Image (spheres, helix red, strand yellow):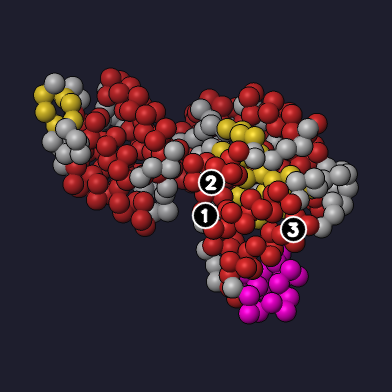
């Protein structure tokens, strides 16, 4: 897409964060700097909220906000880390250093240098659920050593993956997935600023397709505006088409309703292993696909949403994604039946 991405150009200021509790808690951290755990599903604005906090807190946020995405370390080779422009200054002359030591060194050096403005700086650790426990212990020691000059913000989808000493040192801020109406409000405001023509059906299509992922919704709206010149139902559908893996998700839903949980589980496994989904992402996509079709009546959808709420709590706690998603489909398909242990054999209540 030409021009800046809308997620950057229209990043919210602190007072524009629409979730009241999260906004108030972040506001407290401006006047009283503290370590934070910002938690919530993918795409709900955890990084954007931290950047908004930094802009409000620091006179030079471009210097005093240090962003470290855990995937930049744990998903890359030592050579890739060492030659990354963001880290090569820290790692010059340290070619024999083990990967774990490289990570610890970058983090320690980032926390150690003096802030450019004010009395402290902010270090954001994004996607922190991927941090191994041994590295978390090292992080805890760095947090303790530099607590007077460094605020740590730990952004994660699964706070239960963090060790207790880190959780106890951080103030929790929870961001939930926005509703479709909330997403539409954000898209409408952006379209007004960008002078992009739109209609209600087009924004609803984009918002519904995103399934609670605000980042995806904003990028999809921008893609539609660039390709179609406006955001209507027609231009959104032509640009986005059949979104993602909808056919496969429909297949899993249909298999579950027919009582074929083995096939449904197979589709879930493929989407989790090869489709790039995590449990919460796939749960939201499943709800979106079920709502978008005409195969299920209101009672079916209401029951699916109720079960999804229970599954979402388990997924947030970091438990087995495929186990709970399969259990969701099994319980939904069973209707008025009860499920034996292992949920493989429904029996009449």
Residue mark closest to the camera, 3 vs 1: 1
Q: Is 296 above or below relative to 162?
A: above
Residue corresponding to mark 1: 133
Check disc 3 and report its element: helix, strand or loop. helix
Give whichever of discs 3 and 2 has the lower sequence position. 3
Dot 3 and dot 2 residues touching (CB under 8 Å): no
Residue corresponding to mark 2: 163
Name which residue lies at 33% across and 22% down.
302
**Magenta stretch encompasses residue 89:** yes
Q: Is residue 111 visible?
A: yes
Whole-number angstrom distance, CA of label 3 to CA of label 2: 22 Å
Q: Position of residue 55 (x, y in %)?
A: 79, 41
Whole-number angstrom distance, CA of label 3 to CA of label 1: 20 Å
Give whichever of discs 1 and 2 has the lower sequence position. 1
Residue closest to the eye, 233 or 6? 6
Residue corresponding to mark 3: 110
Decide if residue 175 is on the left or right side of residue 271: right
**From which residue to which does the magenta span run?**
80-97
Q: Main secondary structure of the magenta part?
A: loop
User: Which of the 4 quarters of the picture holds residue 187?
Assistant: top right
Check disc 2 and report its element: helix, strand or loop. loop
Which quarter shows the C terminus? top left
Q: Residues within 10 Å of mark 3 (few under 14, many from 20)?
A: some
Check disc 1 and report its element: helix, strand or loop. helix
Give whichever of discs 3 and 1 has the lower sequence position. 3
């Amino acid at each position: 897409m030409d021009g800046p991405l809308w997620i950057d150009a229209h990043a919210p200021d602190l007072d524009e964060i629409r979730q009241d509790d999260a906004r108030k808690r972040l506001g407290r951290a401006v006047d009283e700097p503290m370590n934070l755990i910002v938690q919530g599903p993918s795409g709900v604005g955890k990084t954007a909220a931290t950047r908004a906090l930094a802009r409000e807190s620091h006179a030079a946020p471009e210097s005093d906000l240090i962003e470290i995405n855990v995937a930049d370390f744990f998903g890359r080779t030592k050579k890739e880390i060492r030659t990354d422009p963001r880290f090569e200054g820290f790692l010059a002359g340290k070619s024999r250093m083990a990967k774990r030591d490289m990570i610890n060194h970058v983090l320690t050096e980032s926390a150690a240098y003096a802030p450019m403005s004010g009395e402290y700086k902010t270090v954001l650790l994004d996607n922190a659920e991927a941090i191994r426990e041994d590295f978390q212990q090292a992080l805890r020691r760095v947090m303790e050593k530099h607590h007077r000059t460094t605020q740590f913000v730990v952004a994660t989808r699964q706070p239960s993956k963090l060790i207790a000493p880190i959780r106890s040192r951080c103030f929790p801020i929870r961001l939930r997935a926005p509703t479709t109406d909330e997403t539409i409000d954000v898209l409408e405001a952006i379209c007004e600023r960008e002078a992009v023509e739109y209609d209600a059906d087009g924004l609803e299509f984009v918002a519904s397709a995103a399934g609670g992922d605000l980042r995806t919704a904003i990028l999809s709206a921008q893609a539609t505006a660039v390709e179609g010149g406006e955001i209507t139902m027609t231009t959104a559908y032509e640009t986005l088409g059949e979104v993602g893996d909808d056919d496969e998700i429909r297949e899993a839903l249909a298999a579950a309703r027919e009582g074929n949980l083995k096939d449904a589980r197979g589709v879930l496994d493929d989407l989790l292993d090869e489709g790039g989904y995590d449990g919460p992402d796939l749960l939201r996509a499943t709800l979106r696909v079920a709502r978008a079709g005409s195969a299920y009546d209101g009672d079916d959808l209401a029951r699916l949403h109720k079960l999804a709420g229970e599954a979402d709590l388990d997924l947030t706690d970091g438990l087995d994604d495929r186990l709970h998603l399969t259990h969701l489909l099994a319980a939904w398909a069973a209707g008025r039946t009860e499920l034996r242990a292992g949920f493989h054999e429904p029996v009449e209540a």
